[in-house]
Image (cartoon, helix red, strand yellow):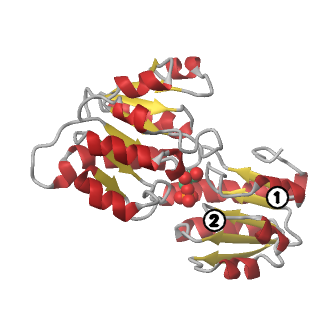
Amino acid sequence: MKVLVATEKPFAPVAVKGIKDIITLAGYEMAVLEKYTEKAQLLEAVADVDALIIRSDKIDGEVMDAAPNLKIIVRAGAGFDNVDLAAATAHNIVVMNTPGQNANAVAELVIGLLIYASRNKFNGTSGSELMGKKLGLLAFGAVAQNLARIAHGMGMDVSSYSPLDRPQMIIDAGCHVHESLQELFAFNNIVSLHLPSTPETRRSIGYDLISSMPKDAILVNSARQDVIDEEGLLKALTERTDLRYVTDLKLADHDHAVELLGDRYIFTPKKMGAQTKEANVNAGLAAAQQIVAFIKDGVKKFQVNK
Ligand code: 3PG
């Protein structure tokens, strides 16, 4: 039984060691493919593997065709839009994620980005504080829940709109509930996106919502680049020069956005939300344990291609 850890963006070494300990203790072999630059390297590495641990690595039908022994793919993280689920099901491959395991890391990054933006990128001018500001969370999954906890500690006024209709969960977390997406955007100084990338959410955040935000508002995206309607965002921010877009996912036409928006477009050079030792250990070890439980006992908890 062979397990491959295929991560274009590598885990911290301590996480790789922890994964290896679990895999070898179970009597399996482990291989690692990190920082690969060509799909051909991935196709070659999967040829003899039974299980695959990935992050945002793209796994399509071609990769599955190249891996005739593959039985399980675990996305060490939350979002699984990078895996072709229909192809996996057709290949009789179980796909799982590890929900919640890297959520605190992403929430902390959002706070860091918001402080950086609110203090004018530490450029010496007077910025503003987060205390007392209204923070609206779009969706209320694990990252949003962690963000609510931290933001409450900072004295922010936190609210949420959940497309999954989770009012009680939002109330129990001490947040106000919005009845609609429109209300969330019109009400809050900061709106933070926590949507998965699905056919329904892709390009769902556009001109009307963004241009309805209050004066000096910030839209922060640590979720997925493609939930933004880029044309609509650029149009809204061109008209409203008080608004800012802060993101862990660079826009598709990044250079154009830099040129157009200048300092009002704040971005990380590479997606960094889940890039902490702790999140790597949490998600990586959970992935390894889920593989062992599946191979040994057929446990399918967290399967996402049912
Ligand atoms: C996730 O979906 O878990 C996050 O977006 C983190 O992705 P990453 O593992 O590629 O950093």
In the image: residue 34, left or right of residue 83: left
**In front here: 277 or 230?**
230
Which residue is located at x 41 percent, y 29 percent? 136
Taking 166 as reference, is 29 above or below it?
Answer: below
Label 2 vs label 1, nearer the camera:
1
Whole-percent x and y of residue 69?
Answer: 88, 71
Whole-percent x and y of residue 93?
Answer: 85, 58
Taking 77 as reference, is 235 above or below it?
Answer: above
Q: Quadrant of ligand 1?
A: bottom right
Q: What residue does disc 1 label?
A: 87
Which amino acid, by three-letter code, is at mark 1? Answer: Ala
Whole-percent x and y of residue 77?
Answer: 61, 53
For residue 167, what is the image quadrant?
top right
**In front here: 190 or 69?**
190
Numbered mark located on residue 57 in the image: 2
- Label 1 residue SS: helix
**Residue 191 in view in this figure:** yes
Whole-percent x and y of residue 73?
Answer: 76, 60
**In front here: 205 or 188?**
205
Q: Earlier in the sequence, mark 2 or mark 1?
A: 2
Which amino acid, by three-letter code, is at mark 2? Answer: Asp
Pointers 2 and 1 in contact (C-beta within 8 Å): no
Taking 166 as reference, is 207 above or below it?
Answer: below
Q: Is mark 2 within 8 Å of ligand 1?
A: yes
Which residue is located at x 17 percent, y 54 percent? 122
Q: CA distance from mark 2 to mark 1?
A: 15 Å
In the image: residue 227, left or right of residue 58: left
